[in-house]
Amino acid sequence: MTVDDKPFSQACENNKQPIFEVLYRVLSDTKKVLEIGSGTGQHAAYFAPRLSHLTWQTSDMPNNHDAIKSWLADVPVRNLLAPISFTVGVNHWPLGSFDAVYTANTTHIMQPSESKLMMQLVADNLPLGGVFCQYGPFNFQGRYTSQSNADFDQHLMEQGCGGIRDVDELVVWAKPMNLLEKISMPANNFMLVWQKK
């Protein structure tokens, strides 16, 4: 879907404000954020101008860079950086110092091994006290939070995606990060807020 000749995600449009309200609170002391999987670029274009105290680094696979740049062009602010190439399992961790990481709707797209690697990379590369904000659908203690998520997971599997991950699984993979908050979000999604201890 496109709007004004830019790729457009209705889900991003729907969830940007609830996500922003969490980020505004938990990233209040953050200096530089790495966004893993910037997608269309809508989230970055919305968040960065409203979080002017930090620098927002977009990243994604190269084939998504033009889309991201088209959204970034609409918000010419100094704290929003052009996308760098980063695909979990393909590229090395990006150069630079990041005291926070944000990702939305990526964990269930990745294969389990890629999700595990992402959790480990974030845990290894965040400084002590660093924060990881992870948005999307998640299971809890082996159970779906809704029938729609169960149906969505089946669809994901049919498309060759890894599927919805269980939070208990992520907790093991994320060490030495601790799960500080599990925030219920619209459309049966959650924001998981992790911190490296």
Image (cartoon, rainbow, N blue to C red):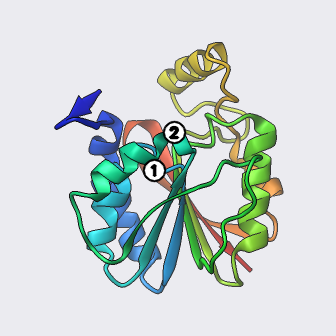
171 up-or-down from 123: above or below:
above
Q: Position of residue 56 (x, y in %)?
A: 44, 70
* Disc 2 packing (10 Å; few <14; some 14–19; many ≥20): few
Q: Quadrant of residue 75?
A: bottom left
Q: Which residue is drawn at 29% across and 26% down?
A: 1
Q: Position of residue 31 (x, y in %)?
A: 48, 84
Q: Name the residue under label 1.
A: 184
Q: Name the residue under label 2.
A: 63
| Kind of residue indicated by mark 1 | Ser
Q: How many labels does the image show?
A: 2
Q: In which quarter of the image is the C terminus?
A: bottom right
Q: In which quarter of the image is residue 114?
A: top right
| Kind of residue indicated by mark 2 | Asn
At mark 1, the secondary structure is: strand
* Residue 183 visible in the shown view: yes
* Disc 1 packing (10 Å; few <14; some 14–19; many ≥20): few
**In the image, which disc is placed on residue 23?**
none
Front-lying residue, 40 or 131: 40
Q: In which quarter of the image is residue 101?
A: bottom right
113 up-or-down from 180: above or below:
above
Q: Which residue is drawn at 20% across and 35% down?
A: 3
170 up-or-down from 187: above or below:
below
Q: Residue at x 71, y 84 (%)?
A: 128
In the picture provided, is 189 more to the left or to the right than 8? right
